[in-house]
Amino acid sequence: MPIANPAPPEESFVERVGKTRRSRYTKHVLLCLVGAVMMYPLLWMVSSSVKPNELIFTDLSLWPAKWDLGNYIDGWTALEQPFTVYLVNSFVIVVLSIVGNLVSCSLAAYGFARLRFTGRKLFFTLMLGTMMLPGHVLLVPQYIVFAKLGWLNTYYPLLVPNFLATNAFYIFLMVQFMRALPKELDDAARIDGCGPFRTFWKVIMPLCLPAFATTAIFTFISVWNEFFGPLIYLTDSELYTVPLALRQFIDSEGQSQWGQMFAMSFLSLAPVIGFFIAGQKYLVKGIATTGLK
Amino acid sequence: MTQTTLTKGPARRGAGPRRAVAGPAPGRSDARAGYLFLSPWIIGMAVLTLGPMLASLYLSFTNYNLFNTPDWIGLENYRKMFADDQFHQTVSVTLRYVLLATPLKLGAALAVAIWLTQSRRAMGLYRTAFYAPSLLGASVAMAIVWRALFADDGVQDQLTSSVGLGIGGWVGNPDYSLLMLVLLAVWQFGAPMVIFLAGLQQVPRELYEAAEVDGAGRWRRFVSVTLPMISPVIFFNLLLETVHAFQVFTSAYVISGGDGGPAGSTLFYTLHLYQRAFSDYRMGYASAMAWVLLIVVGLVTALLFRTSRAWVHYAGGSR
């Protein structure tokens, strides 16, 4: 390498600097462009939510020529129930789902990651297999079971699965995290007289908080957005979650409600955006580690 | 549960209430605790996964509408399904979607990830901006926005009209409605992108330097260093995104108003299954559809694993 470089050094140096700077600028411009295209639908939604109806499809600019905050006030009461009801319902389901996932998945993950017993490997493979399983295969029988239990039109079908660690993704995430903790911790705890339960509670749990945070945020976002479960299990509008409520805007399309629809859509996404900004670090780490196994 | 009987190894004294200072024997087993920790998962697995799987297999051979007792009809559901034109349409819609959305989404994810690793100063900001849509894209709210963007006189209509393509909004156009859903999928390229980014950051610098010394150009370095080094990540993303694409539901349901229109152009497999089960209460038929989906997804997964031996490169011992 030192010998085989006959080009005059000063010229190639200048050239190279010029080229990299130019290409860096074009790269940033391109990235900004892609970013703008990506952000456009969201910005358009926000801007349409504060425009008077007649301007939504005529005024393409993102900055509204005329502001109309009435969309939020009217949209709040435009559906069968006031929007507060839907927000509270969604919130209750989300919080209970987070609790369920954290408890049941961390227990299972500790079993898989730190304990030894017959059948563990088999169970683990089975668990990984369910990650790839299309949920529709379970749909009809689960519906029948829940119907037989009299759980239709209640929250149980949406909540109970989360308390039974059916979400393999979170177990996997926590297993990965726990496996990275030094094995000596368990041995030390054992020597100090801790059984598996104390070890889990006092030693492993506190160290797994980042993995729990990731699970909580992912659960929040996926349950908050979930549509299919509520669609088949909930029939009374007092029980509707936010996504189900939003669908009513499309069913009752009176053309005149565009602004309200966007206002409520934006409200429904705001908590997700908030959680995303607050928990970005954990989210990115979470999906990155599962991807790299 | 009967966990204690399952332990292997001789003379388990640990089955008692509290074990006295167990030695650090290499063959120690935590059977009791293990099954206890796993018990929620085991119950869930039995009652909500394996049980229902078998039940739906049985139901797929029956005529069942939720109110009668299941009536065994053999392969009749499957025979009807394969003879049904609508079924063929759902298969074609779904396959076209999978074959378009998955490669485009992954291509965008990889391209942007490579761009981002080259300019690390602003990476955090861009990563955030590009990742956010993948969290929102599956929501009803986003489907509503998409529907409006591609409605008649919507943003897309005005843009395409301004360049002289007066084809109207894509929502109502059977030739373009699927494409619009593909675009919604591509818009969510952020999740696989983050996984690619993590993979790209693990490629050792020395490999690039060595390739450069050997006179490899940019393209050559990409093909001979980057691609093989991140092939496990490509495989993971490909598998995950393909399986997901088969199961798309919410956006198609909301955008088409639940009927898979216009002219069945967005009648996805899952949407069709939902209609058979919960509009017609043909639970047996829906179960048969679900099993066909399971088998197809299983075959695709197996195929990907099989071919992966040829192109996925695992660097040994880097774990």
Image (cartoon, rainbow, N blue to C red):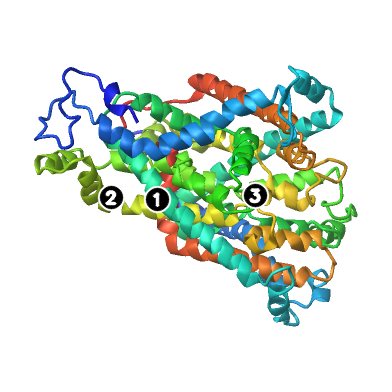
- Kindly identify which residue carries mark 3: A233
Q: Residues within 10 Å of mark 2 (few under 14, many from 20)?
A: some
Chain letter of the residue beneath label 2 in the structure image: A
- Mark 1 vs 2, N-terminal side: 1
At horizontal 44% and vertical 32% (from top left) the residue drawn is A127
Q: Relative to B204, does residue B123 appear above or below in the rendering?
A: below
- Mark 1 vs 3, N-terminal side: 1
- Give the spatial CA distance, label 1 vs label 2: 11 Å
- Residue type, numbered disc 1: Leu
Say which quadrant the N terminus of chain B sits in: top left
Left or right of B24, for residue A60: right
Closer mark to the observer between disc 1 and disc 3: 3
The tag on residue A205 is: 2
Which quadrant of the view contains residue B62? top right
Depth order, front residue of A70/A234: A234
Q: Element at badge 3?
A: helix
